[in-house]
Amino acid sequence: MRVFFLAVGILFSVQLLGQNARLAQQYYSDGEYEKAAILYEKLYEKNRSNDYYFDRFVDCLIFLENYDRCELAIKREIDKQPKNSKLFVTYGKLLESQFRDEEAKQAYRKAIENLPPNQYQITRLANAFIRQTKYDLAIETYETGIKALGDEAVFAYSLGDLYRRKGDSKPMIKYYLSSLDANPARIGNLKTIFQRYLPKEDYKELQVQLYERVQGNEDALHFPELLTWVFIQRKDYNGAFRQVRALDRKLQENGGRVYRIAEIAANDGDYDAAIKAYEYIVEKKGNISTFYIDAKREALRCRRNKLVEGFDYTEEDLQILEAQYEAFLNEFGRSKLTAEIIYELANLEAFYLNDLDKAIRLLDEMIAFPNVDPFIQAEGKLNLADFYLMKGDIWEATLLYSQVDKAYKDDLLGHEARLRNARLSYYNADFQWAQAQCDILKASTSKLIANDALDLSIFIMDNLGLDTTVAAMELYAEAELLVFQNRFSGAFAKLDTLVATFPEHSLDDDVLYLKSKIYYKKREYQTTADLLQQIIDKHPEEIRADNAIYELANLCELHFNDLEKAKILYEKLFIDYSGSTLAVDARKRFRILRGDNIQ
């Protein structure tokens, strides 16, 4: 029975303590420091191990400017706990509140000088300084603790945090790396910290310190792994490749690390670094590596992308690439497993080598493979339809578009097929049916398809209002089909006829725009730019104006390296044409050119 009453008494005491703590906090929050001080003093007397209550009691007395009582209370505690260095920090805070700065400094100095070689006490004192944002004194506390304990790793992470708060990158990096050496599992956390808090210009310092660590401890794999990450952040994929290649050799891996770096480099458009990494897997790991086929295929794609995206290639370059595709297919055969490579080769033949017959043969072969991936087959049919359209076989083209539309009615592939069929109807001057299909596709979940459908719909609607417009539109649509078929001289002739027959027509800006497309395909970029500038200057209110601004900005950025003009054009687009479907991307491009950190 006595045990029962004792338990009840203890429970009641704990509940009462909790109630008083909540009430004290409420008084403190409301600024009723006198009432709060009474409660916090009582709470501390009942629970002397809780520094929080004593600190709050001191804070209340300081707010009340009851300095004498506060000093008496602190000195009494120092007498009771002479080895509690944290109390000297509390005393220093009181002295500072009375502008007794020199005395406060002496108290802080005494706190550090009296510090015992005890990890808990060292951490406790450092935290007391941190709560007063006295980071230099907290750093001195930890560094004194390191000397006393003879172990830097104990406080390395805490010191890294303090130097981060101070914005002092060099020692911040030093101590964070020391903490990583003590706990390699912390690498993910440090990547997040560096990405969030380390200024980009200080990544070079991180790289230098990591090199020193790698050379000083060749068995510490976490350092080359973090160094690889630094190279990726700096977009130095060759540097990243060197690190993972060394790890791959050291650990006798199968190329997995190297393959991942190659993927990152390829996705970021550094095709040379990606090709180098893929070729390492092919040449050094051979066909016993599980990454061999993928590496060989992706290296081939990178070579293609490097050519077609670089806009700087010769006929010989294209033929070499064609031979590399053929060599791949000769090695791995022609089947459902290599269907994507055949699809890519067909596009190379049609769009760059101008061999439509070979492109059609390749896709016919690929589509007929047993058990070929249905999506690759459908994409093959769409391009095969394009190739037939380029040859002038409109019936075969619309048949293939319709097959994909029917098979993937509610899928983006089906929407793409419907859009291409609508454009084919537009080429045939069936404008109303084409517009009706585009109006449906404006609701597509694909932003690209929806925007293209919207553009074509608006274009048709904008140019079908005049009595003579149908004839002019027919000429323009025929010219567009000729451009699609790469029959540029015929397209120019159609456009010149249109301008001569219908002077000062609403299609004038569209004629300039289509001509710019032709010159762009011919890689005559200065003429392309001149035509786009004409649209901007002479037709700022017409529907092609925003397209002209965006494409001229792209030319300035990617071909002329005139980044300042590109930036001006992107800004003009998202400010003056804020309703354009290109405005969002223009704003993003502008911010990148301005140097903003875009995630």
Image (cartoon, rainbow, N blue to C red):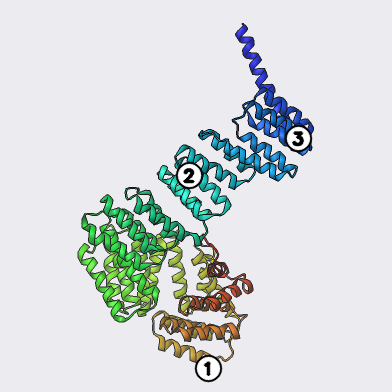
Residue 572 point in image, percent of width and height:
61, 75
Q: Amino acid at mark 3?
A: Leu
Task: Give coordinates of residue 295: x percent, y percent.
Answer: 29, 60
- Residue 371: quarter of image: bottom left
Please tell me which residue lies in front, 26 or 79: 79
Tell me which residue sits at (62%, 29%) in the image. 82
Q: Which residue is mark 2?
A: 156
Crowd rating for badge 3 (residues with CA inside 10 Å; few <14, some 14–19, many 20+): many
Q: Is residue 474 left or right of residue 568?
A: left
Apparent side of residue 394 relative to residue 286 in the rendered image (left or right): right
Secondary structure type for disc 1 = helix
Q: Amino acid at mark 2?
A: Ala
Vertical comparison of 129 with 559: above or below: above
Residue 538: % across, % down:
60, 86
**Residue 437, relative to residue 46: is it above or below?**
below
Q: Quadrant of residue 314?
A: bottom left
Mark 2 falls on what kind of element?
Answer: helix
Q: Nearer the viewer, residue 412 or 76?
A: 76
Contact, CB < 8 Å: mark 1 with mark 3? no
Q: Is residue 364 visible?
A: yes
Does the image show residue 474?
Answer: no
Q: Identify the residue at image location x=24%, y=66%.
A: 328
Which is nearer the eye, 18 or 116?
A: 116
